[in-house]
Amino acid sequence: MAIVMAPHNITLAIGLFTACLMPPAALASDVTYVSLSYDDALPSQLTHAVPALDSFGFNASFYLVPTNPGYLNYEKEWATVAANGHELGNHSYTHPCRSSLPGRSWVDKDNDLDSISAEAMKQQIMQTNAALTGLDGQKNRTYTIPCGDILAAGEDYLPLIRDHVLAIKGRTLSSEEEVIVAPSEVSAEALISLITQQPDDVRIINVIFHGVGGDYLAVSNKAHVALLEFLAANREDYVVDTYKNIVEALNTSDAVASY
């Protein structure tokens, strides 16, 4: 099963979620952009997702957390991922989330966004940018909001980070034109349907994965490869690229970031 989320009101649901270099996606009104992204710097992404993406020639976005073991133990591997054309995105430095929301008993008190200030979150985004620049040399970076939580100690921190990120996933276009789906434990058919059943006016479909064939909130290798096969067979209808490349392509038109 899956949850489809409006990009301006993102929530994380556990267990119920909805190497060729490619040029930036060309802007076209008759195609839908698909951003395949992978959160949290999980080892299964390096083991399973990256080889599958490379085999189809798709570039994707990997939103990394520099304090996670999957980052600290594989920095060289992530640098290679970037060299192969994938995007390394900002997912904050420690991945703080709000403990006060339902189902958040797992949030550590030292990483509780209910008690972390908006200014501290800005510093986290800046720290992560610096760490990732050390891997890929890039300056402009997109951001995915951990857990979809935008309140830091009760204050919306997104206005404070506007000058430090190129774009925030799910907030480049209006909520009618851009959606986020976060699949977990879904069949290949259900995963593909998250693409095909979107309304015609949706221009960007953001598919956020976590584990692929392992780790947590995972999809199977079979389902993941089936989605890539579908997208490869329908390139005339779906433009697959990194979120950064999609945003940069849209910025050549009259699109205005809304975050």
Image (spheres, rainbow, N blue to C red):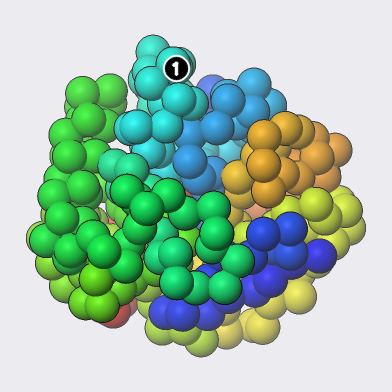
In the image: residue 184, left or right of residue 49: right
State the residue lying farthest toward the top.
Answer: 76
**Residue 224 at x, y = what percent?**
75, 42
Figure quadrant of the N terminus: bottom right
In the image: residue 112, left or right of residue 13: left
Query: Is residue 245 in view?
Result: no
In the image: residue 204, left or right of residue 136: right
- Mark 1 is surrounded, within 10 Å at the Cα level, by few (under 14), some (14 to 19) or many (20 or more) other residues, namely some
Residue ID at (72%, 44%): 218
Query: Is residue 186 in view?
Result: yes
Q: Which residue is mark 1?
A: 74
Residue ID at (16%, 72%): 159
Figure quadrant of the C terminus: bottom left
Of residues 94 and 75, which is closer to you in this image? 94
**Residue 108 at x, y = what percent?**
42, 49
Of residues 22 and 259, which is closer to you in this image? 259
Of residues 94 and 109, which is closer to you in this image? 109
**Residue 150 at x, y = what percent?**
33, 71
**Could you say whether the residue bearing mark 1 is in a helix, strand or loop?**
loop
- Above or below, 78 against 230 in this view is above
Residue ID at (26%, 32%): 132
Residue 155's image quarter? Answer: bottom left
User: What amino acid is at disc 1?
Assistant: Tyr
- Above or below, 134 against 101 in this view is above
